[in-house]
Image: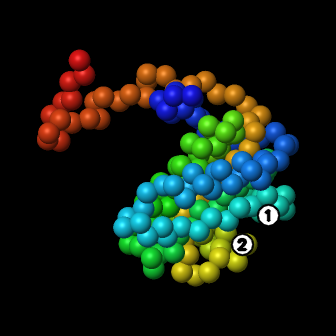
Amino acid sequence: MEFFEVLRKRRSVRRFQERPVPRKLVEKLLEAAFLSPSSFNRRPWHFIVVDDREKLLALSKAKLGASGLATAPLAIVVTADESRSDVWVEDSSIAAEHIQLAAFDLGLSSFWVQIRNRMHDDKKTAEEYVRELLGIPENYRVVCIIGVGYPAEKKPPHGDEVFEWDKVSYNRFGEAWKKP
């Protein structure tokens, strides 16, 4: 499939079939993450592969909007060692997006659960909740969780309405980009 076709057709899916993701495909997802660029090639990320049903159910309660993890057969928790790079957020986010694009290319679907800067409840952050659940060391920050699996829903590709040309400036902010 052509790259721009992948970009148009990849959609976030939060309902999955009860079908495990084969280990061979999980390794391909991780390879995609390892191939992502990072500042000064520091690669501050660390990935936690979760396929344990009880842990997935617990992760689905990390924050509002994480409930799709309850039906996902797989989650990849994206963390980063903040002592390795000052741009750990960007580096690990790029790796997470590589996982999502690779999932689609492999016939899977995925969705992003934002953990960093989100609350689990009024007393605990989502990051603290996930850190405690999975035994993540203090110097590792939890960026997001990518839920992955075979889709139980189908969404149409993105249409041309996503092209917001009015949000593009040319040479100077506010100078309109003129599309031929």
Q: Is residue 39 left or right of residue 32?
A: left
Give neighbour class at mark 1: few <14, some 14-19, many 20+ (Cα, 10 Å): some
Kindly check if marks 1 and 2 are in contact, taking CB atoms under 8 A apart as contact: yes
Height in image: 112 above or below 132?
above
User: Which label was assigned to residue 30?
Assistant: none
Q: Please identify the residue farthest to the top as the structure is shown.
A: 180
Q: Give the mark nearest the N terminus, 1 or 2.
A: 1
Q: Residue 25: x and y, percent?
A: 72, 48
How many labels sit on residues?
A: 2
Q: Is residue 161 visible?
A: yes
Q: Which residue is mark 2?
A: 134
Q: Residue at x 61, y 24 (%)?
A: 156
The quarter of the picture where the C terminus appears is top left
How far apart marks 1 and 2 lie (CA) works out to 8 Å
Which sits in the foreground, 160 or 3? 3
Q: Please, what secondary structure does the residue beneath circle 2 have?
A: helix
Residue type, label 1: Lys
Residue at image position (84%, 58%) is 53
Q: Where does the image place residue 102, in percent across and percent down from the top left?
A: 60, 44
Query: Which coloring applies here?
Result: rainbow
What's the amino acid at mark 2? Leu
Q: Residue at x 43, y 29 (%)?
A: 162
The percent coordinates of residue 131 (x first, y second) are 65, 74
- For residue 117, above or below residue 82: above
Q: Which residue is mark 1?
A: 55
Instruction: Assign the N terminus to one quadrant of the image.
Output: top right
